[in-house]
Amino acid sequence: MGPEHRRELIVNAVLALALLAAPLIAVTLDEPFYVTLASRVAILALAGVGLNLALGAGGMVSFGHAAFFGLGGYVAGIAALHAFEDSHFIAWPLEIGGSEHMLVIWGIAMAASAAAALAIGAISLRTTGVYFIMITLAFAQMIYYFAVSLPTYGGEDGLSIYLRATLPLVDADDGLTFFLVCYALLAAALYFSHRLIGARFGAALLCARMNPERLATLGIAPYPVKLTAFVLSAMMTGLAGALYAELNGFVSPAMLSWQRSGEIIIFVILGGVGRLFGPVAGAALFILLESFLGGWTDRWQLVLGLILLAVVLFARGGVVGLLAGRARHD
Amino acid sequence: MTEALLELRGLSKAFGALKATDGVDLTVRPNEIHALIGPNGAGKSTLIAQVAGGLRPDAGRVVLLGEDVTGWSVARRARLGLGRTFQVSSLALEFSVLRNVMLAVQARESGARGFWKPVRKDEGLRQEALGVLARVGLDARAELAAGALSHGERRLLEVALALALRPKLLLLDEPMAGLGPEGTRELTGFLQALKAEAGMLLVEHDMDAVFALADRISVLVYGRIIASGTPDEIRTSAAVREAYLGDHLHAEKA
């Protein structure tokens, strides 16, 4: 293990501990706002970890990941609505009602995101470069306008979740507990990504980004490899969407908007494209800027823009790259 | 007679009015090096691309190891037993030399499957890859990033990647290009020995290497094969002298 690799492990550990420590300290100081803030960081980081698999490892610049984020959110919202009203999502030929079980909602959110990503990816991955960016954006916009035109589920105004779904054994209504649940899922997604990218599939995926022609010449078709990664990526982002809706008690088309897609890309770029903990650093920095600069001036995004500019021009490895040095695939 | 490794039948490909490949018939038999020569713009690269699968012919068939692979993808042809090297090195430059070859070994063994076990700790994969690197004399450079290799070393890594697939047929697109005389001599010796393992279709501009290695030579001019035979037959063919070798041989005599 080289010294740079060890440095990245230390940076990752510090990030993980800081994110865990912040809400624990906030609880002892009786500042629930910061617990919610930490939950947002964990959830948005999870969405970013999802995108990072597609963008960082596979080189797929998806400008439509809000589609999966919002889809996960709407699964949570719709499940809560029907559970609350005791009505049916589908009444015939199968009776499908709502659910107040978070595990069920997570499962459906990931399944729905996977299905959507399979369809969107199957078409989008026939293109590359700027066309891929545009076609993923177009799909996300279609889903956005579909949600806007759904009066049953709030249309433009969105949908409130009056009762947060429940988990076995723990009280998900408690702010700190909910944070810990989000944190555990983020950790699981990070570990899953780490194993996946270090395994044979990951080697093929990285080569598909670097040199797809080479990969094909070795006998591995790049298309199914990238599509698989795209679907797994969307599942993580979809799960994050379900958590985000539960956190806010609200889901609206804003979760599906192209601005949201852009934000998820910003997490990844800010933190370091392709770096395991990049999205964690990126989401944390983004939320900190938004909360603290945003409380001071409405033009906080000007500062964000400058920071983004600096990262793109001078620190391609993002925050993690700045702290831990260049990435290596040895 | 044993079955041909590669058989091209009436292969044709046109770009607009330009017939880049014009009814080409060609075979590569087991343990044979079949060289394809021709002046610049003769359509060698277009022909190679149709054999490798990157380009679909307008007409004709590509038969590989007895299978009609005309409609097959690049990856599927590779899995059947086609290894190739590129005219311009095509590598995963961020990977180490070793990881490039490990990926090739992996591709042959399991493709992209394997979602959990770390490649870094896969001793079987590592040892086989190191063995292949030793064959081409790159084992001392294994830990280097592929992007840090010299031009000549990249060419050797290309050969190693093809070998790791244990191909039945090797498609070599100007493997000597840019190698010094020393490198060319070494690679010529290596390919000579490799004939026992795989047949080869060799595209090469270095005529010394071609005449030293080839069992048969086909001459491509304007997309057509104007002559095909043993090196001696090609050397003495009037048509070939006229169309292509003329200048080259006169220059040698002078």
Image (spheres, coloured by chain):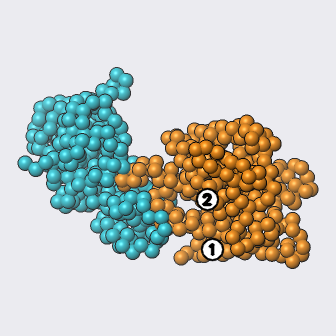
Chain colours: A orange, B cyan
| First along the sequence among labels 1 and 2 | 1
Inspect the image, locate mark 2, and give the three-letter code of the amino acid beneath it.
Gly
- Dot 1 falls on a residue whose secondary structure is helix
Categorize mark 1 by other alpha carbons within 10 Å: few (<14), some (14-19), many (20+).
some
Please state which of residues B104 and A81 is positioned toward the viewer in this rendering. Answer: A81
Residue placed under numbered mark 1 in the picture: A9
Q: Residue A167, relative to residue A205: is it above or below?
A: below
Which chain letter matches label 2? A
| Residue occupying image coordinates x 20% and y 52% | B199
Q: Residue furthest left?
A: B1
Could you tell me residue B226's position as x and y percent?
18, 32
Categorize mark 2 by other alpha carbons within 10 Å: few (<14), some (14-19), many (20+).
some
Q: How far apart are the alpha carbons under marks 1 and 2?
A: 31 Å
Please state which of the two labelled residues, at mark 1 or mark 2, is closer to the viewer.
Answer: 2
Please state which of residues A74 and B191 is positioned toward the viewer in this rendering. Answer: A74
Which chain letter matches label 1? A
Q: Quadrant of the C terminus of chain B?
A: top left
Inspect the image, locate mark 1, and give the three-letter code of the amino acid beneath it.
Leu
Please state which of residues A38 and B52 is positioned toward the viewer in this rendering. Answer: A38
Give yes or no for contact between labels 1 and 2 (Cβ–Cβ under 8 Å).
Answer: no
| Residue occupying image coordinates x 77% and y 51% | A85
Find residue A42 and report its image quarter.
bottom right
Q: Residue furthest right?
A: A296
- Tell me if I can see residue A319 in this picture: no
